[in-house]
Image: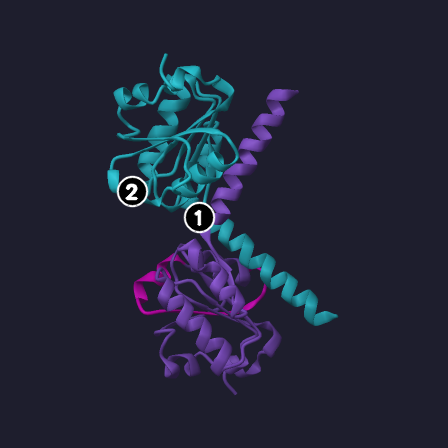
Chain colours: A purple, B cyan
């Protein structure tokens, strides 16, 4: 029985893309004892993983069905697509959702204008510009309140 | 008296960098009747502003003191540095804070490892990877809770 086969479905998260966000997520999930596999087309991107990272890292393409099978996607409870390309993330998310019936699928989208379309498809989207704008807004709000006091 | 001179200090926000985040912020602030000026080195980046954008957009470099003066930085209550380059954002933030004594200074940093350093300098930082990781974490937490029910 392989390493992955011993793991329960509900614990297993696959991350596609080991950029800053992917690596941050992988490190956090691993620190919290989650079972995580991270895939990237570029081996050198795994340098972003913490030395304590306790998950698996494999070189592969999230749009390739064989690579997804190798990552044991049918066992995954969640797939998180966070490569630097919106089109790739959406394609991975749709494969995970429609072909492999993964329950929880999350994709990063740099382009906020596409967000609503994919939310209708049942894919949760993360849009860094929107999140950052909300955070700035919070800072400015707090600042205004401070000055009023 | 110029357009800007008629505005009160507490209302005036300068945004450096008209990428997705800068434009989203400028549009939001303008929609909420804020006085906002956005600066970018590249004229074509202003295409991201909404047709209803009611602020000013000027071509200039946020690291150039003359350009900052032209943007009337001494009148600004807040400066938000959101170009695509961490070093530029930090330089702009430090100029705004140390030379022009702007009360509220916010910088985007792609590299989360630098965040703590700049927070010590009194500069609020926005790190998209950290914000996005928190958002994914929230999605996964909600998902776990739903399954337990």
Q: CA distance from mark 1 to mark 2?
A: 15 Å
Residue at left offset 35%, top offset 62%:
A85
Quadrant in the picture for the C terminus of chain B: bottom right
In this view, A131 is above or below B12: below
Name the residue nearer the viewer: A98 or B63: A98
The residue sitting at the top extreme is: B1
Furthest residue toward right: B149
Q: From this viewpoint, is residue A52 visible?
A: no
Image x and y of residue B1, in percent: 37, 12
Question: Comparing marks 1 and 2, which lies closer to the viewer?
Answer: 2
Q: Chain of mark 1?
A: A
As for residue B114 lying within the magenta part, the answer is: no
Residue B100, quarter of picture: top left
Question: In the rendering, at what x and y percent does residue A21 appear?
Answer: 44, 56
> Label 2 belongs to which residue?
B45
| Residue A71 makes an appearance in the image | yes
What residue span does the magenta drawing correspond to?
Answer: A31-48
**Could you say which disc has been placed on residue A129 in the image?**
1
> Is B86 on the left or on the right of B64, as rendered?
right
Judged from the image, the secondary structure of the residue bearing numbered disc 2 is helix
At horizontal 65% and vertical 62% (from top left) the residue drawn is B142
Same subunit, tags 1 and 2: no
Q: Mark 2 and mark 1 in contact (Cβ < 8 Å)?
A: no
> Residue under mark 2: which chain is it in?
B
Residue B92 pos. (x, y %) = 34, 29
Picture residue at 49% right of the left edge, 53% below the top: B132
Residue B49 falls in image quadrant: top left
Which residue is at the front of the view, A85 or B134? A85
């Amino acid at each position: 029985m392989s390493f992955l086969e011993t793991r329960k479905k509900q614990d297993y998260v696959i991350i596609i893309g080991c950029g800053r966000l992917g690596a941050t997520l992988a490190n956090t999930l691993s620190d919290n004892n989650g079972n995580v596999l991270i895939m990237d087309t570029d081996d050198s991107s795994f340098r972003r993983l913490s030395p304590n990272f306790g998950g698996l890292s494999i070189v592969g393409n999230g749009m390739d069905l064989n690579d997804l099978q190798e990552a044991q996607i049918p066992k995954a409870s969640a797939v998180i697509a966070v490569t630097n390309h919106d089109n790739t993330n959406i394609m991975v998310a749709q494969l995970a959702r429609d072909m492999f019936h993964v329950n929880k699928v999350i994709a990063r989208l740099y382009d906020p204008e596409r967000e609503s379309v994919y939310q209708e498809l049942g894919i949760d989207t993360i849009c860094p510009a929107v999140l950052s704008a909300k955070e700035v807004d919070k800072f400015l709000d707090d600042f205004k309140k401070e000055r009023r006091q």
